[in-house]
Amino acid sequence: MPSPLFLYGKPPISHTKVNHLDEDRRMSNMENSFNKENTSFKNSILDKNTFSTTWELVPGRGAFERSQEAALLAAEQAAKGGKVHALTITDNPGGNPAILADFLGQEIIKMGIEPLIHFTCKDKNRNQLESQLYALDRAGIRNLLVMTGDYPRTGFAGRPKPVFDLDPTHLLRIIGEMNQGLEVKTPKGTAQHKASDFFAGAVVSPFKTLEAEQMAQYFKLKKKIESGAQFIVTQLGYDARKFHEVLQFMKLHEYDIPVVGNIYVLSYGAAKLMSQNKMPGCVVTDKLVAELDKERNSPDKGREARLLRAAKMYAFMKGMGFAGVQIGGHNLKYEEVEYIIEKGEELTANWQDLIPEFDYPIPDGFYYFEKDEKTGLNTDKPVDRDDIPLASPVGFQFWSMWQMHKLAFTPDVGLFKTMQKIYTHKNPKRYPFEHFIKALIYDCKDCGDCALLDLAYLCPMSQCPKYLRNGQCGGSYKGWCEVYPNERQCIYVRVFSRLKKYREEEQLDSYQIPPANWDLFQTSSWYNYYLGRDHSALTLGIRPPEGFQGEGMQ
């Protein structure tokens, strides 16, 4: 199996200074510029003496409907109130169509408050994502939260075709290169664009049930950080120990970037949906659902209890050392956000006393660190994972494929040179034997840029609905795929299990797999591998035999 660190293009630049465009010129393009020192999200999250607060808005489907007007009214109130540093704007949440977050962000920024745009990889290929970044840069919108995005569910005349051309690690690299000044090919050679000034973050979920799921999340987190993520936001959950686990993980691996905790003002209806994974990635246990069921019988339908719970989460997150919080909730009003902030500040002094109230472990769930019995949180010592059973059976097929790899696919070993010579005489567009074998075993989609060698001989193009090549999304639940719950295990649960059996699981964060090269679509992946045309050529240093006149790496 390949193991060297894989860096394609320029190295990530998340922790290096870059030359920015003149800020005054940028701000003059906005009708109503505002005092960045007081309202800048980036300043707030990087300042150790400021606890950054953002408020999530879900503007919904339509252009001039009630939800869009409500979002703009909320933005106006937040700008005047001065307690919120940025407004986060969702991107087609739940896989349903909604107004473009980018455009609403332009309206919000004119009100005197910054937007934090949810910038997802779904619904757009790499060219459209790049185009969108140019538009955001031109509009002066700098704050981006990069995510995979929900699988599409609804659309005009039926479910739309899913598009997941890039994953967050790829997108973060593009953003990093744009911040340096993206180099592009031109008819006359190479040109360098003016540097952008994006402040891009990524997401991680600590709320996973299985060891395989959670480790896949953390391996991908490391890739996101190495790809340029400048801050991290947690997924949604209510287990205080799991929130603390993210901070301990960052400290263990010496990642000095801010982490933001996610607070959702939870109603009974939303809790029921989340407990059934109807809102993928959001974790609510049956114990918490039962408490909410009792609270809704009060005269105010549980409103006071919901807001107080959110304020307590604010307090323990600030006490733990989070850089800030993201506050959300269905039909949440600005005065309720203010209450959460003010009450949270009041409770922060005694935050440790609140931890027992947030004891909502997933039954038989995995924790990365050993429990600290005194605090109810975590020690800094990782648990011993050797005796944890594999989440997915590992049979003879993986072992046999691994042996075949050693024999025929390891550069300069075994039959590799012989196979190279054979494939110099092959037609890359005619490969019936290879297609038959790989379609039978892997349901091969003939992408021509094969990632089987990278992912324990499991194909992300056929077995992951989001085609993810660098780690799982946040939507898996108890090991099941977000799109096929209780039917299909997440491919990364299976990959991790295969690698763990042979103590190779660290491969999942040892290098990054680039996006599929569609120049190679419906060509022989063996031809492309042996003759140095696919991504493995860069990873493993494969070069075609001397004198070969065919094409090299695309």
Image (cartoon, grey):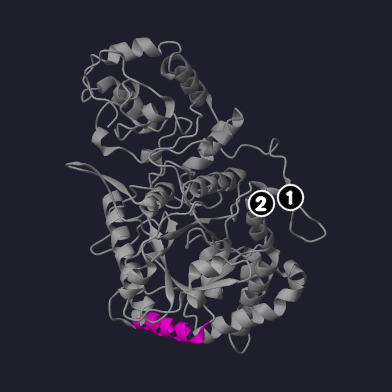
Q: How many marks?
A: 2
User: Percent from the top left, x then y, of residue 418?
Assistant: 35, 9
Is 98 placed left or right of 256 in the picture?
A: left
Is 416 placed left or right of 138 in the picture?
A: right
Q: Up-down: is 426 above or below 507?
A: above
The reply to whether the C-beta atoms of the residues labelled 1 and 2 are less than 8 Å apart is yes
Q: Hey, which quadrant is residue 393 in on the image?
A: top right
Q: Secondary structure at mark 2?
A: helix
Q: Residue at x 49, y 34 (%)?
A: 5
According to the picture, the residue beneath numbered tag 1 turns out to be: 380
Q: Up-down: is 198 above or below 309?
A: above
- Residue 375: within the magenta? no
Q: Nearer the viewer, residue 410 or 441?
A: 410
Q: Secondary structure at mark 1?
A: strand
Which amino acid, by three-letter code, is at mark 1?
Answer: Asp
User: Percent from the top left, x then y, of residue 547?
Assistant: 25, 13
Label 1 crowd (10 A; few <14 / some 14-19 / many >=20): some
Label 2 crowd (10 A; few <14 / some 14-19 / many >=20): few
Q: Hey, which quadrant is residue 98 in on the image?
A: bottom left
Quadrant placement of the C terminus: top left
Is 115 placed left or right of 216 in the picture?
A: left
Q: Nearer the viewer, residue 457 or 485?
A: 457
Q: Main secondary structure of the magenta part?
A: helix
Q: Which residues are magenta?
A: 69-82
Q: Residue 251: which numbered mark, if any? A: 2
Q: CA distance from mark 1 to mark 2?
A: 9 Å
